[in-house]
Image: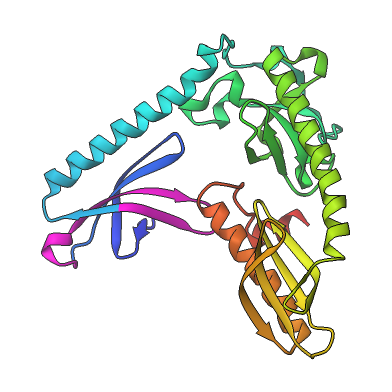
Amino acid sequence: MDKRMAGDYEIIQSFHIGDQEVVLGENVNAPPEERYMCAYCQQNEIMALYNDVQVSDDFCEIAKLYGERLAQQAEKTRVALFKPKFQGIDTTPLTKADCTPLSHEDDLNGKVVVIKQEVLRREYQMATNQIKLCTGGFGASPHSRGSACFCVDLYSGKEARFERQDILGTLEQSQLPQWAALGLEQYQNQHRQKTHKGREERLILEQRECAGYIINQSIKVKDSEFVLGEHPKKDMYVTWRCKDGDSYFWGHYTSNRYEALKDLCQRAEQEIDYLAAIGEIPPITSKKEQERER
């Protein structure tokens, strides 16, 4: 097997629990005082992000830190996962008997689905992590060559990607426990509000102007927005990062419209990669996987 590396450090121990992984690495070629390291890791199919890195020449010291961080992460996760039980929610994992089994003919778009218990990491094997709303993906359609299904968790509201084969079955609205029915209602209300807000933003976009530039393109990535402006009297274009719809900063200027358009897309793509790396949005499908799904 290929060695797992973090820069020049070989990862020799790792344990993932909750939303983070704790890793311990060794670099035999590092300065003596930096031979061993311990860090937290968040990763997806594109990149791995290591943070709060500590180094030492004392293996026992770094092993102790690894154990302490693992214990802290386990306790943090235990407390977070106790919340549904504290709310009186039955978290008993769902089985085939609790839902309608999936068939190849099922269209999952807009359906409430149940994720197989064994697909989830052990700490998440409970009903509140199994019931999701499928919002799209190639795998949501019947007889599709792709398998990706994008879902929203009806307890936490978080987005995630699963494969069609990860889905145990579907639930009708009448079968939903109270907490899941409430989560579905909240998602539907938020979706309607976003649709309405999107219409308003398109109207506002037609009127936006900054430093003589007319804003005519906009890409929103979660809470961030990137815009492209064109100067009506000069052959100049600019892309900005925008906050609250009227605060523009970090401008990139050019006299080439297509260069500006490319820059707008690249800035949005970089933001997506960053959010995926820190776990704010679902992992991004690799190019090879996208080709398979086509």
Horizontal arrangement in the rendering, residue 261 relative to residue 288 (left or right): right
Horizontal arrangement in the rendering, residue 6 relative to residue 163 (left or right): left
Instruction: Please tell me in which quadrant of the rendered image residue 33 appears.
Output: bottom left
- Residue furthest to the front in view is 211
Scheme by which the image is coloured: rainbow
Horizontal arrangement in the rendering, residue 275 relative to residue 102 (left or right): left
Instruction: Please tell me in which quadrant of the rendered image residue 55 appears.
Output: bottom left
* Residue 52 rendering spot, x and y as whole percentages: 32, 51
Name the residue: 18% across, 46% down: 62
* Residue 113 rendering spot, x and y as whole percentages: 73, 27
Name the residue: 28% across, 38% down: 69
Residue 145 position (above or below residue 190): below
Q: Please identify the quadrant where the C terminus is shown.
A: bottom right
Specify start and end residues of the magenta stretch as a single range: 29-52
37 in magenta: yes
Can I make out residue 145 in this image? yes
Name the residue: 59% across, 65% down: 270
Q: Please identify the quadrant where the N terminus is shown.
A: bottom left
Task: Between residue 111 and residue 262, name the one nearer to us.
Answer: 262
Residue 278 position (above or below residue 211): above
